[in-house]
Image (cartoon, coloured by chain):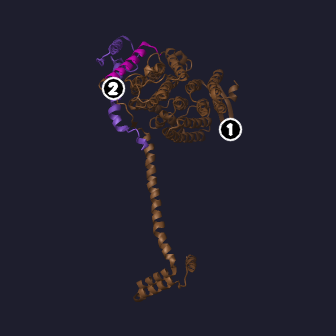
Chain colours: A brown, B purple
Amino acid sequence: MTASVVFPPALIFVLGALLTVLLRGRTMKMAALLVPVAGFALLWTTADGSYGQISFIGLDLVLTRIDPLARIFGYIFQLITLLGLIFSLHHHERSHYGVALLYAGAAQGVTFAGDLFSLFLFWEVLTIAATFLIAAAGTERARGAALRYLLVHIAGGLCLLTGILLHYAASGSIAFGAIDWASPGAIFILLGFGLNCAWPLLHTWLVDAYPEAPIAGTVFLSAFTTKSAVYVLARGFAGTEALIWVGAAMAAFPVFYALLEDNLRRVLSYSLISQVGYMVVGIGIGSQMAINGAVCHAYAHILYKSLLFMAMGAVLYRTGSCRASELGGLHRSMPLTACCCLIGSAAISAVPLFSGFVTKSMIMDAVAHEHRQIVWLLLLAASAGTFLYAGIKIPYFTFFGRDSGLRPAEAPRHMLLAMAGAAFMCVLLGVYPDFLAGLMPYRLPLHPYTAAHVLTKSQLLCFAGLAFVLLRRWRLWPAVGAAVYLDVDWFYRRGALLFYRLADRLLNGFNAGAEELLLRRAMPRLVHFFEAPGGYLQIAGLRLLAIFGFGSDRLQASSRAVECRSRAGTYPVGIGVLLAVLYLAVMSLLFLI
Amino acid sequence: MSQPLKKSPSPRGKLLGGGFTLLLLALLGLDLLVHKHVAFSMEEWFGFYPACGLLAALLLVLIANYLLRPLVRRDEDYYDR
């Protein structure tokens, strides 16, 4: 057990990331694949407890705290790292493996951090690694999305840091455990977590960035950022009433966008938010049954969601498109990918015998157990919607439906292997729920397969399917086609442009005005004046005297005489003398004042 | 509930449509036979889950298509302009 004192699981991943930078080719890929396996072996052989306690600038840090809640997240993060790395074997650049392992390591770090300080450090590494994963696509859109992702998450990170500092100042403890949301700083911590969890109004970074990332990058992205946020919420804020409503809104609203969107990876991104909504509801309820449901749903969700992202990634890899309007009929040439996609769709739709059925039922039962009827109805409606966009829309418009005429080759072998692994897990969790029961944070009986459960779920799904058939027949199904569907990010994407234009008008306008006044108008006059300063001053003096009635009759003659003297150069006062006189006049005036 | 499905010219399509209609009818029939442990009284109504699935799906699509879509749909290069 002393091994983990030296090697917290996160450190294995970080060292692995460094190792990939030193190696190359096949050796580098093999080394990268071994990292999650080593992490799993370490976690498997380490008993629950706290390891690696160190004191740093007066703070008691706990680098590794293993308990059932952290363990289940640790396992699934390691499994998805392995599957994601297998899926990305077509990448030859070392940076991909390095950043992916760093990202996975940060997720391990967040999961096993026993204190808020180290949690915050790993939280920030998550953001930075994710930014690089998104930008790696190399397109202009991806770079823009990555920059927006970074800015939004830095704001969230600062919010979290504020909360942690206030919490530490008030409680005197940096340990990470349950936090009362009414305590000082807790609201900032909650918002910081909520941003990574993609709460409504804080969610647009996700649907903006994930569809732009490279296909392998999205597999990692879909697993770590939001689910590590689910983990910290489950640990810190279980039973916080407000989360029930946040989660219900989260489960429901993305359904509308997912039904409209043409880009199928963006459909999956909205669907990700909706599924995380179920977990947030479970955390909000906070009973043992609900926490079990939320955690198991996260476990199942990571697998089926990454499976769907892999399937769409493989389609994008082979055809260059993942738009519903450009695809169709691909089952003819990509039957295995189609099969894996169907398994993922069945799992997310909670079809009996697939993982989502078991885990979603746990949350629905926990909601029903608390007699929260409105939330329950919202989640039920969202389930029907999920079946429409993920169970039907994605496989139908990609692999079946109208024949697009595309006949791409089947996905590469490594992609098929990764998809098969995830698909196998989706079925395993569905047909053998005891596998999950052994990992749940609380030991409770798990009986998903009652006749009533299976019947009601089948009824819900089949009649939602009937709605699809009718809507297609009546031509009421949303037309597919390239478009942008505005979301809350409009406020900062358009708002930033507006601010830029306003600043441009205001500051550049001031600049232009000053140039006109000083350079174009004042300067020529000054130059003109200094050609004969003494003469002009004397003429001005004469005019002043004339106004008061002295020598007004001789003004013109005197002015002409002065001008003559100036032109002839016989005027005795030069510029140097004039400036000296002016200087002395100003000084004596100041002295008098 | 079980409206006739779109008539497909191919025999396979007809078979699928017929099979699906039978499945829906069977699921409705089973509603009378299977005992449910209910948390809410509405779950006991005949055809609650089928109606819920059908209506929720119809409403979600119609709201998305006719309320949300006109409000938020823009050309693809909207943010690039």
Quarter of the picture containing the C terminus of chain A is: bottom right
User: Label 1: which residue?
Assistant: A56
Residue A424 appears in view: yes
Residue A500 in percent (x, y) is at 46, 50
Answer few, some or many: residues within 10 Å of disc 2's Cα (few below 14, many 20 plus, some between 14 and 19).
Answer: many
Q: Residues within 10 Å of mark 1 (few under 14, many from 20)?
A: few
Q: Quadrant of residue A464?
A: top left
Nearer the observer: mark 1 or 2; the answer is 2
Which residues are drawn in magenta? Answer: A448-470
Q: Where in the figure is residue A403, as x and y percent of width and height?
A: 38, 23
**For this rendering, which residue is in front, B7 or A90?**
A90
Instruction: Indicate left or right for A52 with A563 as reference.
Output: right
Tag 1 and tag 2 share a subunit? no
**Please, is residue A569 above or below residue A343 in the view?**
below
Q: Is residue A183 visible?
A: no
Q: Chain of mark 1?
A: A
Distance from label 1 to label 2 (Cα)?
A: 58 Å
State the residue position of label 2.
B58
Q: Nearer the viewer, residue A465 or A378?
A: A465
- Residue B62 at x, y percent in the picture: 33, 29
Query: Which one is in front, A388 or A558?
Result: A558
